[in-house]
Image (cartoon, rainbow, N blue to C red):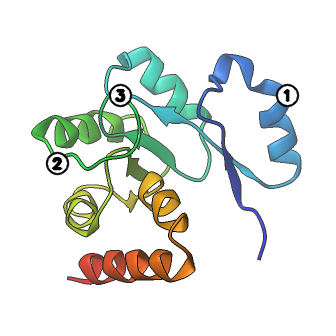
Amino acid sequence: MGVDGLIIPDLPPEEARPLADACAQHDLALIYLVAPNSSANRLARIAAETRGFLYVVSHLGTTGGEHALQDALVDQLAQIRHHAHTPLAVGFGVAGPEAARQVAQVADGVIVGSAIVERAAQGPEAVRDLVSELRSALAR
């Protein structure tokens, strides 16, 4: 058990050099986020700098809640794949098993964050139940 990488949501690559260097020294991935409205130049820079995987924000707004997989996400992933050298994991709005299953059809990874935090407030069994539901949906 240990740490493989760091996700610092509000850290742009332009301000990350000290942390990126420290991560490299300790064999940790520094994972950046890319938004749907990132320009091609910005996308290329973020994709070049990220390690481990690229966190693809599925929609603008705040995390949490479930959003249907949209054609825009499929198009966004296709554009990102031209620049990426790491797997693409999609998060934001992936709150339940059906959304996770849909995202897994087009992405390399699925990130479920807020839904797990919400379930954690209900106790460990609620988290286990959600993880079990997600696992079942992804196994189909």
Residue 110's quadrant in the figure?
A: bottom left
- The secondary element bearing badge 3 is classed as loop
113 to the left or right of 67: right
- Vertically, is 39 above or below 100? above
- Residue type beneath disc 1: Pro
**Residue depicted at 71% across the width and 61% down the height:** 4
Q: Is residue 51 above or below residue 134?
A: above
Amino acid type of disc 2? Leu
Which residue was labeled with disc 1? Answer: 18
Residue 66: x percent and y percent?
A: 25, 50
Q: Residue at x 54, y 66 (%)?
A: 120
Q: Identify the image quadrant of the N terminus.
A: bottom right
Q: Residues within 10 Å of mark 1 (few under 14, many from 20)?
A: few
Q: Earlier in the sequence, mark 3 or mark 1?
A: 1
Marker disc for residue 6 = none
75 or 57, nearer to the observer: 57
Check if mark 2's residue and mark 1's residue have beta carbons within 8 Å.
Answer: no
Query: Which residue lies under the disc numbered 2?
Result: 69
Q: Is residue 83 left or right of residue 32?
A: left
Q: Please tell me which of labels 2 and 1 falls first in the chain.
A: 1
Residue occupying the point 46% across, 18% down = 42
- Which disc, if any, is residue 61? 3
Find residue 33 and report its horizontal and vertical position in percent.
50, 35
Q: Secondary structure at mark 1?
A: helix
As shown in the figure, which amino acid type bears the numbered disc 3? Gly
